[in-house]
Image (cartoon, helix red, strand yellow):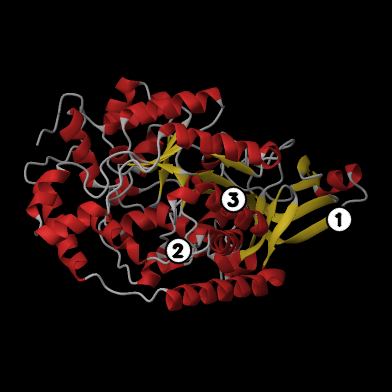
Amino acid sequence: MGKIILAPAYLWDGVSKQPVQEICLGIEDGKIIQKDTLQRCRAQMPDAEIIEGDYFVLPGFIDAHDHGRAISPTGFGVPDAPLEMWLQDLWKLPALDHETATYYDGLQLASSGVTTVLHSHNPNDFGRLEEELSKAAKGYRDAGVRCILCPPYLDQNKGIYAQRDDFIRSLPKDMGKAFAGGIHDRIHTMDTYLALLDTLTGKYQKEIAGGLLEFQLHPNGGQWCSDEALLQMKEYALAHHMNIHMHLLETKYQAIYAQKTWGCSFIEHYEKIGFLGPWLSCAHMIWLSDRDQELLKQYEVLPVNNPSSNIRLRSGMFPLRRLVKKEVPVGLGLDGCAFDDDQDYLREMRAAFYNMERVGAESIIENIIPLQMATAWGSKIAGGRLSPGKLEKGLDADFVCISMEELRRPYADGFADVIDLLLHRGRREAVAMTWVKGKKIYDRERDQKKLWEAQRRIADEIRELREANPWKEIPWKRELISRIEDFYKGWETDYEDYSHCTNCTEKKIYL
């Protein structure tokens, strides 16, 4: 790689409270070797290429929870609905090739300033996980984005979180038989799962050592994974210096499940069994008590906010302000369910910023918080091993260049806060360039055609899949979803909202 001096109008390093002006980055062999004025950078790097522009430069963004779908379920006739009902409709999705999907998804992310994505894998076929994950890795690699691949594991409670046999008996006989026939709790053993990780990490040693790829253990969700499996995963993770990522406390019914099962929250239970630690990150994490939040801080667990998804699936509002007040770092993820189905990470930062867990004066958070979520805090999803989330000497040069011309359009005073402009006006169109390890992976002037071609390719593949397997409605599915809705409504009869209580260790919920 050559030598580059990046001379933007504004630079925010992921650490400081405010952006600075007249500070440049000297980059060589993918690393930041200097951070100084243009004159001093030129003196140290006289033969470097100078990239000047009216840019706001920030560390590369980290999408800390996504699914690499490329196309939102909305495009396949799956309307947004509460998660427990929404999941029942995902059978409508075509078995899209994972390389095609992650290549298009990776290009969308790169064009939105993302340099690392955590990919929570949705299998087409659990029996072909190694092949599917290899294809997903290639798609992201061809798009230039670093990726964390998470093969899923589950061994309980598919379909319904609890009292499943009672629920099935309540269904009409034919419907109950069809529903039960589609449930496979333990698709593979833990030994098979860990052997898969051994194979994948061995296959990609070079990419892992180069900081372009990593694998994490992925219990699919708290209600779907037994304690025994979680503790085996923890043992493996610690022995292999790996992390664990899972969905947790996305919905009210998941919070109730924990109370029904253990008489305490998921987080309290996980502390009791020794599962909490800095190796763990959890997506969604909406239904947290004050005690849960204290435990997250104590054990350095990283919660990941998915604001658009949480709103679209009617899950609830993430307690961002309270977590920040407790000094708990928080990541940010698109979840493949961003507003407008466009994987626009800048808009997701805006959704996080306008979090309405409180109203009035109590709702305000500092404008720097979404930037920290997107960068330095988000980098904790991989322990800083991939995109570092900071622009400091000695670190990899992962950064995004935002066009100030776009942020000022149609007008902004010269004294307007550039972070406010980014949060209120930022969108994909404002991303001028995205760089990973000193290599430009996206240039708005150069790569629009590449995006359009990937879009056409994925649309053509979906049409072929639909022609080969014409979609047909399953009539009893509508009634099943209605019955599932009524089932979970029954859980709420004696439910007491504990999410804002002050002493939740004494205030239990029993149903």
| Residue linked to disc 2 | 95
* Disc ID at residue 134: 3
Going 54% across and 31% down the picture, which residue do you hit? Answer: 242
Q: Quadrant of residue 499?
A: top left
Res. 64 in view? no
Dot 1 surroundings within 10 Å: few (below 14), some, or many (20 or more)? some
Residue 49 located left or right of residue 310 = right
> Is residue 423 positioned above or below 209 on the image?
below
List the residue tagged with mark 1.
49
Q: Position of residue 158 (x, y in %)?
A: 27, 46
Q: Secondary structure at mark 2?
A: loop
Q: Nearer the viewer, residue 123 or 482?
A: 123
Closer to the camera, 341 or 291? 341
Find residue 174 and report its horizontal and vertical position in percent: 14, 61
- Residue type of the residue flagged with mark 1: Glu
Q: Is residue 116 left or right of residue 308?
A: right
Task: Specify which label sits upstream in the sequence, 1 or 2.
Answer: 1
Question: In which quadrant is the C terminus drawn?
Answer: top left
Give the residue drawn at x 68%, y 42%: 207
CA–CA distance in space, label 3 to label 1:
36 Å
